[in-house]
Image (spheres, rainbow, N blue to C red):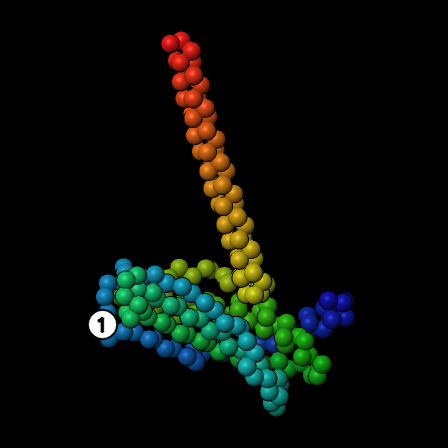
Amino acid sequence: MKKEAIKQYDAFLRDINLQQIIPTILKVHRPSQFVSAANYAYHVTTAGPLLTNREQTPSGLRVTADHALTIDFHHEKEPELNMKIEICVSASYLCKQENKNCEGDIDNFVKGNVALHTWPYLRVFVSDLLSHMNLPPVPLPLFLMLRKTKPEKATKEKATKAKVTKEKATKAKVTKEKAKATKTATKTKAKVKAKKTTRKKN
């Protein structure tokens, strides 16, 4: 950021205030038959925070952002018993700043600041809900680290690493087979030599 942009963003941060955080989505996809929670493994995914609304009101600019979290519970033996929990909270802010050129400031705020407010609420909702459902706690981190690596890039890197690992395994296998063949050939030569030596003695 340039100095002027930083100064403008600082002013934006001083003027924007959190109004409320409320849950907007709470869905539990649970099978009719419920078995011991010990048979489940879980996977957590997050979406957001994402800007969902910006509206100019008599009181100022109102900004709303949503932050969603999904927990998939996978049954180890019976997939039909899988469960899913979906939670989304919405954070509303009011900015009294009159500067109309604050679109970039809003985007930066949603990307870098909103999670500081919404993540603790999501952690509490998850903890309470799992406790009431008699499910084991899901240890969510104290603070959500936003990943800059794109899923496509991460997948590509993972595939590359897997390819390298496979190539190394193949080379190791070939080396092992060569060593085995060399050992067998050496034994064969030794046997032949021993037979020749025996014949000469006789």
Total numbered labels: 1
To which quarter of the image does residue 11 belong? Answer: bottom right
Along the viewing direction, whichever of 52 and 36 lies nearer the viewer: 36
To which quarter of the image does residue 7 belong? Answer: bottom right
Which residue is rendered at x = 27% and y = 59% of the image? 38
Classify the position of the C terminus by image quarter: top left
Position of residue 32 measured from the top left corner of the image (x, y, whole percent): 24, 75
Position of residue 155 measured from the top left corner of the image (x, y, whole percent): 53, 62
Position of residue 54 measured from the top left corner of the image (x, y, whole percent): 59, 84
Which residue is rendered at x = 49% and y = 36% of the image? 178
Position of residue 9 measured from the top left corner of the image (x, y, whole percent): 69, 72
Identify which amino acid the numbered label 1 is placed on: Gln
Residue 86 located left or right of residue 79: right
Residue 106 located left or right of residue 151: right
To which quarter of the image does residue 63 belong? Answer: bottom right
Classify the position of the N terminus by image quarter: bottom right
The vertical placement of 169 against 199, above or below, is below
* Residue 8 visible (yes or no): yes
* Residue 59 visible (yes or no): no
Along the viewing direction, whichever of 157 and 124 lies nearer the viewer: 157
Q: Within 10 Å of the Cα at label 1, are there few (<14), some (14-19), or many (20+) other Cα atoms?
A: few
Which residue is rendered at x = 23% and y = 69% of the image? 34
Which residue is rendered at x = 45% and y = 24% of the image? 189
The residue pinned by badge 1 equals 33
Along the viewing direction, whichever of 157 and 99 lies nearer the viewer: 157
What SS does tag 1 mark?
A: loop
The residue sitting at the bottom extreme is: 58
Residue 107 located left or right of residue 179: right
